[in-house]
Image (cartoon, helix red, strand yellow):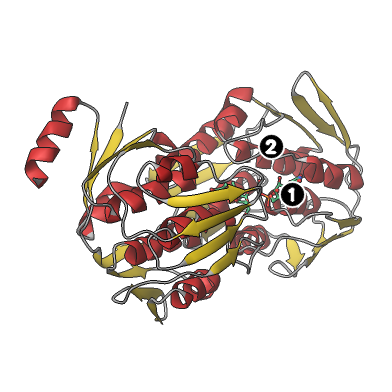
Amino acid sequence: MEQYIIKGGNPLVGEVEIGGAKNAALAILATAIMADETVTIENLPNVRDINVMLEAIKGIGGKVDRIDVHTVKINGAMIRDLSVDYEYIKKIRASYYLLGALLGKYKKAEVALPGGCDIGSRPIDLHLKGFRALGAKVDIQHGLISAEAEELQGTHIYLDKVSVGATINIMMAAAMAKGKTTIENAAKEPHVVDVANCLNSMGANIRGAGTDVIRISGVEKLHKTEYSIIPDQIEAGTFMFAAAATRGDITVKNVIPKHLEAISAKLVEIGCEVKELDDAVRVVASKPLHHTQVTTLPYPGFPTDMQPQMSVVLGISEGTSTVTESIFENRFKYVDELTRMGASIKVESNIAIVTGVGNYTGAQVSAPDLRAGAALVIAGLSAEGITIIDDIYYIERGYEGFDEKLAQLGAQIQKVTTEKEITKFKLKVS
Ligand code: EPZ
């Protein structure tokens, strides 16, 4: 089983190129099958989840040509199978975006019901509420969601909770419905805007993405396009927090600074210097860092996908901080692992009370999920001594070349699979 081994203590210094946004790309790959012409998607992150989504598209008969690791051409003309295999939804929940895409295009779709995951139960009731509001008959039997409609009729949908997935899935189905659809209380994440922009470049008529009211006028057909995915704000934020944790100086390049405002604001609040350039942000952590309060919120609030990374940095900042997780009900599983590295964190329901300690000490820990895994890497980079991280396949679901990019910034980190490699690494860094 692959692991990361890290010798902590080096301040990370330098520049790192940020890749395409995984959570935009997963949805945009699904929209690509809605045309019967070739859709070219560029700046794809080369991560496991993207590769699974491409397999799922091939699985229903979509034509997938990988031009290079970051570029793919998709053609949905030959799709015959409107049922997405359970194996894909088991691997990535986001396969459910094929439900909205297939229902929008063919007025019929079947996708396995996604289970819960590492950070909570993750219901999709709002997605199904939206499809039913558009006139689809939606049944759940034997773990399968089947949705079907003579035709989809535009309507007014109010989302009881702000949901990225439901906003995007309903937007896709409504894009090819008859008439106008309004989605109220819509998610405003940059990746929601990216999906709307991609659909509009394919001939859809979507207005208001990025605000809490999205207006869609359905169209008969969608056509080919060439579209480039926006930079990944969470990958960027993860490197920015690595600069803070290691008291380093990192410039994240090829980003949209506006998408990082909540992350930058928190770094400034705890004592980092943050300099925004046109398509880059520089984080310098030369002074001792101190406590703050943070609550995760839908965009433009502080992102839940940055919550574990925030706790890791606060765990070695002066004073006592609070981290409130308002989006998911079980996103503090990493705290037990971090405690083994010397953290002093107490979790009471959805609030973590973080008492800063001088530093972490290296230990063997396991990644409980994607973002928590990345946060434990950050802890290992700042820790005194050696940290070994198990279950790094979680991390590779959403971070391309994570260890290589960190090593280029001066981190002593290596991906290993054998005891021999671990011994060699320890000799090299001792
Ligand atoms: C997306 O998940 C992201 N995943 C998550 O990133 C991210 O944490 C989340 O948005 C919030 O930003 C992808 O884009 C693939 P939601 P999603 O629907 O769409 C509840 C990562 O690390 N809810 O906005 O599933 C839900 O339980 C992943 O990259 C319902 O109750 O999130 C949660 O409490 C982790 N009913 C809240 O809404 C529904 O039908 C927000 O979830 C849908 C959601």
Which residue is denoted by mark 2 in the rendering? 121
For the residue pair 321 and 257, the one nearer the viewer reads as 321
For the residue pair 59 and 288, the one nearer the viewer reads as 288
Assess mark 1: CB under 8 A from ligand 1? yes
> What is the number of callouts on the image?
2
Residue 102 as seen in the image, left or right of residue 266: right
Which residue is denoted by mark 1 in the rendering? 166
Amino acid under disc 1: Ala
Residue 325 as seen in the image, left or right of residue 336: right
Assess mark 2: CB under 8 A from ligand 1? yes
Q: Nearer the viewer, mark 2 or mark 1?
A: 2
Residue 283 as seen in the image, left or right of residue 153: left
The structure residue drawn at horizontal position 84% and vertical position 43%, both measured from the top left corner, is 131
Categorize mark 1 by other alpha carbons within 10 Å: few (<14), some (14-19), many (20+).
many
For the residue pair 288 and 245, the one nearer the viewer reads as 288
Q: Is residue 61 above or below residue 106?
A: above
Residue 360 on image: x %, y %? 32, 52
